[in-house]
Image (cartoon, rainbow, N blue to C red):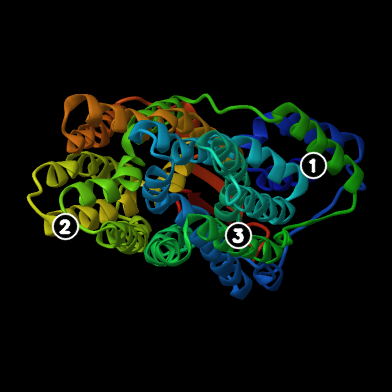
Amino acid sequence: MNAEDDHLLKTKLLKTDTQVSSSISEVAECSTTSNNNLMVTFPSAKDAENTEKDGCWAWVVCGAAFCDLFIVLGMHYTVGVLYAALLDHFKESKSKTAWVGSIAQFCLFFFCYPGSLLSERFGCRRVVIFGGLFTSVGLLLSSFANSLYVIYVTHGVIVGFGTSISYLPALVMVAYYFDKKRSFATGIAASGSNLGALGLAPLQQLIVDSFGWRNCYRFLSGLALIISICGLLFKPLEEKKTAEYNLEKDSQVIEDKSSKKKGPRFPRNNWFIIWAVASTVATFGYFIPHVHLVRVAEEMGSSHRDGSLLLSYIGIGSGIGKIFFGKISDLPWVDTLRLYNICMVLSGLSPLLALLAVGYNMLVIYAVVLGLLDGCFIGLMSIVTFECADRHRISEAWGGVLMIMSFSMLIGAPAAGWFGEITGNYRNLFFLAGAPTILGAFIFSLVHCIKDPVISRQQKRAIVIPNHEKEIMLVYERLTVV
């Protein structure tokens, strides 16, 4: 092998397998025309360690994401408390009142894709700070509303949008800051939403009982400002030193051309399409228990306070489940996709516990079981997206999945309220909470039967070992490095 071929091989090793096809010809052209000036200096082990990934600040980011989701999703998961208060105050039907939380949850996920594009354009830190301020304003305006239609806009649209652009960047930052413990760290951050449900449900109930629902909105408005404080901690990740180029201009030209070719585009590989359809179907009934469970408990003879505690039990179970399944998913012998598929089926069967409940204690068991399974269903959703999509489009893929899911979430809770009213038994709504999830699990199982060329290409890639310029190692990029 001559010097020129050896030089070109080193240059290729700096590219991932998905980038080589689009940029090697341009690198080769640069090497032939400017071979004497282009030099690649491989990094030392000390340079490789000069990174913030998996370091101390990574855990600070994880903690900030935890607090972010504690407030953002904690408010959405406990919407049943305000739902019951608004139902008593405005005297409207269950389905009409349920639109408040349903519109907010729709906007929460619908704006995730635009939020991901905003994060790439302006950075996660700025977007989260703005989202916290926007959420606070929406909650404050809701406290002055005199009709449900006004709350549809203030709570549903404004709060939904603000929480949406605060939610996704938090998980994206955790994914960027972790490599070896990505699933575990994501599980810790995601568990914040469930501890938020645990703490905010009884707290909101206490405020509603003592000061009314309007002051509860004002309290949440002040609490939402903490989201902006969390955003201040999401500082951009410093890139790891991998090589030094004397010819920086040519490298920048190649990078710019590659970026222009990519652009914002919705992923269209086989596994991602299956996953997008399955998750959209499955999440039709996801928020039904969060919206209606408090009122179901009341109609079974429980107090409003005991009904709101059920949301806390869901939060406890889900928080434990997210950490547990996140840790399990990181084990090298665990197939994350099969684990997720099994938990989807069990989650779809869990509403049978509520349908067969003869008292409050059975509802508690249902809430805990649902929470534990929710830990896998929601906690690993971003990881499953990571497994099923092109890794270079993970932010767009994750935002896109959530945006598609929002349409089924929009009609889920109101449809359940309507179904319970026309059937004469309010508890029949749990049929709509379980059946779509089982159907979604069946659709998702197709990933085990259909091959995806995009996923196959990125299963195995070569990178440079920093200790010696001639050595390479193979990375089987699932979530951990082998």
Q: Disc 3 and disc 2: Cα gap in Å? A: 31 Å
Which residue was labeled with disc 2? 365
Q: Disc 1 and disc 3: Cα gap in Å? A: 59 Å
Q: In which quadrant will I find the C terminus?
A: bottom left
Mark 1 or 2, which is nearer the eye? 2
Which residue was labeled with disc 1? 4
Q: Is residue 455 above or below residue 220?
A: above
Mark number displayed over residue 482: none
The answer to whether residue 481 shows anywhere in this view is no
- Mark earlier in primary sequence (3, 2): 3
Which residue was labeled with disc 3? 224
In the image: residue 219, left or right of residue 193: right
- Mark earlier in primary sequence (1, 3): 1
In the image: residue 154, left or right of residue 333: right
Badge 1 element: helix
Identify the amino acid type marked 3. Ala
What residue sits 71% from the left and 41% below the top?
118
The answer to whether residue 4 shows anywhere in this view is yes
In the image: residue 451, left or right of residue 32: left
What residue sits 48% from the left and 64% below the top?
211
Camera-side residue: 64 or 5? Answer: 64
Q: Disc 1 and disc 2: Cα gap in Å? A: 69 Å
Camera-side residue: 86 or 462? Answer: 86
Residue 330 location, quadrant: bottom left
